[in-house]
Image: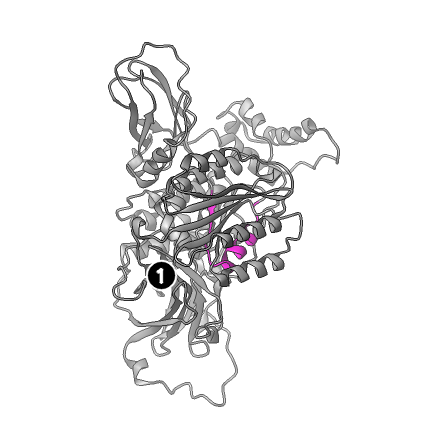
Amino acid sequence: MSIPALAWVLAASLWSFAPADVDLAPSHITRATVSGRVTDAATGDPLTGARVFISGQTTSVLSGDGGEYSFILPGDGWGGREVQVRAEMPGYQRIDRAVRLSGATTRVDLALVPGSDRVMHEAVLRAQYANPAPPPPAGRPQAVQEAVGIDAARRVSGAARAQVSARDAIARPRPAFNTESYAHIEESDFLGVEDNPLSTFAIDVDRASYSNMRRFIERGMRPPIDAIRVEELVNYFTYDYPAPAGAHPLAITTEVGTAPWQPAHRLLRIGIQGRDIAAAELPAGNLVFLIDVSGSMQPSAKLPLLKSSLRLLAAQMRPADRVAIVVYAGQAGLALPPTSGTNKSEILFAIDRLEAGGSTAGGAGLRLAYEVARENFSEEANNRVILASDGDFNVGPSSDAEMIRLIEKERESGVFLSVLGFGTGNLQDSKMEQLANHGNGSYAYIDSEREAAKVLVSEFAGTLFTIAKDVKVQVEFNPRAVQAYRLIGYENRALRAEDFADDRRDAGELGAGHTVTALYEIVPAGIDGPHVAETPPLRYRDRADVTGRAASGELGFVQLRYKRPDDSKSVLLQQAFVDRGGDGSGDMRFAASVAAFGMLLRESAHAGDFSLGDALELARGSLGDDEEGYRREFVRLVRETRVQGLLKR
């Protein structure tokens, strides 16, 4: 069983289940298990992340590695009972099967047919945006407003209409007004090495952009361009980097291969691997969950999913860990005082009582959460506030500048901030990313129980335990070997060259076991390259004057600075890199396929003639072991984007 699936079973065992509502004779079986494999009916490929339900049960499980799932039914008397087993997954038709249980374990394999109940919904959306109906006048009844969405359905072609019933079309009216917020990103261009030999940036371990992108595509919608941060797409996946050796908590790896979208160019991959720490060796946690329970959190993808996610995290708590819950809506309050991880039932009870309603006093909640964290502060512990919200801070003294000053002050005292985003239609992505960056923490977007398991279970240490802070990278390119370069992504993490050695400059954090990947597209010297902005000749520098090292065959030199979590002085690591030819490893080609997909979603001019089909082929050919199935899921997302026509190429 996969780690996420196992964690879900463990978490599920911490609360009660409702028995199936059937009246069949009991048997000697005291516990029954339904297990099997979920596959694509068209290709036979395993499906990871399909949700499996059993009638009468109040939870579900997700298919893990190789499409396998396992559902443990509590209590006794299951032998001979008939239950309904249902499987659902975005992009596929739902399947229901009546199964009679026999023996301790019943095998139920489920094959899902592509082309889901969303077909009509997607067609309605396209019709609305292609030929939108005028909005109803203010004050018109809700039924009239819903009719606007129904009218859009009437404009859909008959072929699309025949695939689903009229009931489905009426049940899915036009989405509500969208107030999601994303910071504008200006894509980095090529820089000439002679005038710009140094490239400096802070690392980014956030992965929120990937799961948010997935949410859009699975709903048949194209993500907003500024919702795509290419470095977060690339860093959603783990890569096989060597573990750190010696005293340093991290290690650097470099590799050079072909840039698939421009074969004449080279691609530099810089990998950073954080030291993994066994769960038993992690410092005790002093965690304060800061939970948004305002009215905007009522939809199922918000507070209900948040509560399921917190149950997963609660299942990981050890006796030495302490957890508190602060809630905020119209006002802030303490829903759970600091409680030991031994009292999981008390923690789960507090989570179950959370209800949404009211406005959002985010600033007051943040101050109270930090106050609770300070009262239980320990030098030896991981002191952290975990903010879970859709990002809607709209009432009270909660200006961005005020909250950032508070977060930076608490950061210096040793209380870090991580952020979990939820929901759709109101996601304040730019604000949530900014808060996490200033709080020496990470930002994740939770769109499903499977993503919650990834962030809070399988990546638990990396998400919540920092091993290095203020991590900065500086690359110096050799002007004899490199004509121009561009850093792919990291636009909002760019630093000035002089910031690299300035220990006062805040940068990114690295969690236990985390990996960070950065890609540079390189134009080798001596070929026709892209246009780069030129600077006037410099009076006091001879461009032809290069050292012997520049003639050594090195493409460049990587430097990295980091601080240990409790230090204020940085440590320096250095490593030269060369081009040994070839296309690169499978890991590198897969990272390139993800970067290319991000470039296509952003309509990057640098993608050239590269297409979705090219990205799909590149990803399929570099899946590797893919134990957890996330790479196969990426292939599915690229395929859905292509099939649904979300991009022109």
Query: Per the image, is 435 magenta?
Result: yes
Q: Is residue 232 above or below residue 528?
A: above
Colouring: one colour
Q: Position of residue 266 (x, y in %)?
A: 34, 65
> Relative to 4, is 356 on the left or the right?
right
In this view of the protein, which residue sits in the foreground, 58 or 36? 58
Instruction: Looking at this view, name the residue that lies furthest to the front.
Output: 375
Three-letter amino acid code of the residue under disc 1: Ala
Q: Position of residue 583 (x, y in %)?
A: 28, 60
Q: Secondary structure at mark 1?
A: loop
In this view of the protein, which residue sits in the foreground, 603 or 324? 324
Q: Say which residue appears at 26% left-offset and 18% top-offset.
A: 29
In this view of the protein, which residue sits in the foreground, 43 or 557? 557
Q: How many marks?
A: 1
Q: Residues within 10 Å of mark 1 (few under 14, many from 20)?
A: many
Q: Say which residue appears at 37% left-offset and 78% top-offset.
A: 479
> What residue range appears in magenta?
427-446
Query: Per the image, is 167 magenta?
Result: no
Give the quarter of the figure containing the N terminus: top left
Q: Say which residue appears at 50% left-offset and 53% top-offset.
A: 375
Q: Where on the picture, by quarter, is residue 346?
A: top left
Q: Position of residue 475 (x, y in %)?
A: 39, 71
In this view of the protein, which residue sits in the foreground, 477 or 407? 407
Instruction: Looking at this view, name the residue that lies furthest to the bottom.
Output: 540
> Relative to 192, is 9 on the left or the right?
left
Residue 311 visible in the current orientation: yes
Q: Which residue is mark 1?
A: 259
Residue 614 visible in the current orientation: no
Q: Say which residue appears at 42% left-offset and 21% top-offset.
A: 18
